Amino acid sequence: MFWVGLLLFAVVGGELGAVVQGAARLGEDDPGAIAQFVVAVNLTPWTALLAVALTYAGRRRLAGMHLKGPLAPAFARIEKSRATGEGPDHTVQLDLTVAPEGRPAYRVDGRARVNVMHLQEFAAGRTLDVSYDPERPWRVEVPGRCPDGAGAPLDTAPENTRVHEPKVPWRGALSAVLGAVLLGAALFLLVKGS
């Protein structure tokens, strides 16, 4: 996907070249120049959005972020909860202490999709059953219901144990994207200029 995204960035460069060339020829009263300008101006943002999405997904895939291992059961203590949204189902943003069996407890952010009738089950201090990925501990799945007496009360893990999903590196990718855009624009202008 990353390489398809880079190819689309080269297309974006070609479209930008078409915009520049069409804008330069607008005063010539050439209907072809007007059509070229209008089409290129309208296509460029959509192609760029698709290119960004594919490049980002490709970077995640190259970094191994798309892999999902088997989930293991654990208990979690709700440190903070905040419901957002409207309607019968709300997204609840959770600050959790996860205590896997045989491993040290850690802090992580999670979320659950909860019916408004069950929001009180997600109050701070409650213990609930969750599933977590031992290889990627930031991946925690929280059920939409907290059964009564899900587990014994847990101690709060310190804030310095918090885990986050790692950021996808963009340093090398940005120069590749810029190069693809410039190459696409140069190729378009060379082909159309000859």
Image (cartoon, rainbow, N blue to C red):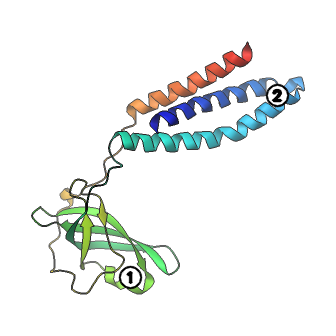
Q: Is residue 10 left or right of residue 188?
A: left
Whole-percent x, y for residue 131 in the image: 26, 67
Residue positioned 19% across, 56% down in the render: 160
Residue positioned 51% across, 32% down in the render: 6
- Look at the picture and state if 190 lies above or below 102: above
Whole-percent x, y for residue 40 in the image: 72, 35
Q: Residues within 10 Å of mark 1 (few under 14, many from 20)?
A: many
- Extreme residue in the left direction: 102
Front residue of this view, candidates 90 and 125 = 90
Find residue 33 and name its label: 2
Q: Quadrant of residue 172?
A: top left
As measured in the structure, the alpha-carbon distance from the residue carrying label 1 to the one carrying label 2 is 59 Å
Front residue of this view, candidates 8 and 168 = 8
Element at label 1: helix
Q: Quadrant of residue 174?
A: top left
Which residue position is annotated with label 1?
119
Front residue of this view, candidates 72 and 129 = 72
Element at label 2: helix
Number of numbered discs overlaid on the protein picture: 2
Type of amino acid under label 1: Leu
- Extreme residue in the right direction: 29
Front residue of this view, candidates 17 and 2 = 2
Q: Is residue 183 left or right of residue 65?
A: right
Label 1 vs 2, first from the N-terminus: 2
Whole-percent x, y for residue 150 in the image: 22, 81
- Extreme residue in the top direction: 194
Q: Is residue 189 left or right of residue 108?
A: right
Type of amino acid under label 2: Ala
Location of the C terminus (image quadrant): top right
Q: Residues within 10 Å of mark 2 (few under 14, many from 20)?
A: many
- Look at the picture and state if 163 lies above or below 99: above
Q: Is residue 102 left or right of residue 123?
A: left
